[in-house]
Image (spheres, rainbow, N blue to C red):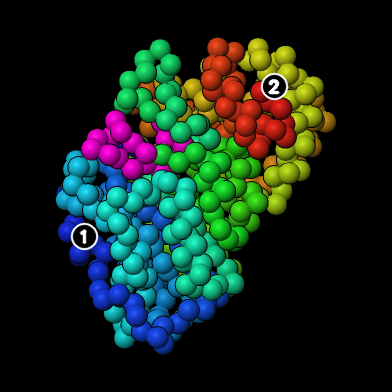
Amino acid sequence: MYSMKKNLILILLMAVLGVSSCSCDKREKTSYENLLIYYGCGYNNLSGYLAEDIRSITEGAVPDVNSDNAIVAFCHNTVRNTGDYQTKHAPCLIKIYRRSGYVVRDTLKVYPEKSVDTDPEFFNSVLSEIKNRYQAKHYGLIFSSHGSGWLPESYYYSPKDKTKSDILRSIGSQYDISAANAREMDIRKFAEAIPMHLDYMILDCCLMGCVEVAYEVKDKCSYFVASPTEILTDGLDYVNIPGRLLSSKPDLEGVCLDYYSLYEKRSNPSATISLVDCSMLTELSRIAADIISAHREEIEALDRNRIQSYARRSRPYFYDFRHILESCGATQQELELLDSALEKTVLLEKHTEYFLRGESDYNIKLDNCSGMSMYLPGASWTYLNDYYKTLAWNKQVKLVE
């Protein structure tokens, strides 16, 4: 997420998380129709914003303690303010529900202070604990933190200037003493760590709306929501999240439109958001593979300055999926097949006219948006290209050989 406001003074954690006595009532309801999981990886400079996520959720349509719906949240924040990454603070698992008209934030478990949110084994253990503790017909996940799409963990976006501040995070980020020592999670390991099938996955993190990420998680979730561009620090409209998602049919379009509306109304409107049907990604990949195979030389010769970008100029790795394939000279028949598949895959796509208009390193005009980004390989990026070959998407479409 890209910080657009002054650092917030973090509300005292006891108040923010509403810590109450541990849930030990033997009569506690443990079987649900719908279970919403929020994973807040916030031991970083987003700590105050992620704490605000939880507070906003409690202002929404929180389910009653006896409802068939439930919200369970993993929270890890800095102890005081967003500049203190040395004082350890234990993450915790809480359950949010309404009892007798009041919202309760019940602490289910406190984890060791040394826990690393972005360790795939730890991530798996948290989700497994939720799954084992609460059986549900339908699980959904919101993951909120930093993110940088499919890029490898700790990849430097500027190979000529390998400073610590240039580190990109694949997904999630936990600071150790400072932002220069960030712990991240590789997107492949992230997907592998999820122990249950999810009805939906919402990534409230920057640059996660790539076809590479969607394809990597397609067997873990039915629907995928993410942004091809960065996400501004306030993130999703969390007040409306419980009402949108804890229903007989989760309103994912509503989640996307709520998010878009938040940022469309600002003085410098900046937002992209997409809803993807993961069941259609295999068909899309077959069509993309045919186009890439037929126009490989043209793709290699593309001028990236003429292709729709979604990222700041210093991070030239995220370009519009369809615009790449259209610009490489795909035939009318190839584009018709592509568009037909895209229509079935990207169920909703919204974007403002610009992303951070007038701001240095951004000022991105958004006028060729298909709903997902894709890598446009650079011949000199040997390390990045070698890593790309390991992604499930590339194994299918052979963009990088």
For the magenta stretch, what is the residue range?
Answer: 168-183
Mark drawn on residue 148: none
Q: Is residue 39 above or below residue 1?
A: below
**Residue at 51% from the left image edge and 46% from the top image edge:** 190
Horizontal and vertical percent for residue 32? Answer: 52, 77
- Classed neighbour count for the residue bearing mark 1: other residues with Cα under 10 Å, few (<14), some (14–19), many (≥20): some
Horizontal and vertical percent for residue 5? Answer: 24, 41
Q: Which residue is mark 2?
A: 401
Q: Does the rendering let one see residue 76?
A: yes
**Residue at 46% from the left image edge and 58% from the top image edge:** 125
Q: Which residue is mark 1?
A: 13
- Classed neighbour count for the residue bearing mark 2: other residues with Cα under 10 Å, few (<14), some (14–19), many (≥20): few
Q: Is residue 98 above or below residue 8?
A: below
Q: Is residue 282 above or below residue 22?
A: above
Instruction: Quadrant for residue 231, please give it.
Output: top left
Horizontal and vertical percent for residue 222? Answer: 63, 56
Quarter of the image that includes the N terminus: top left
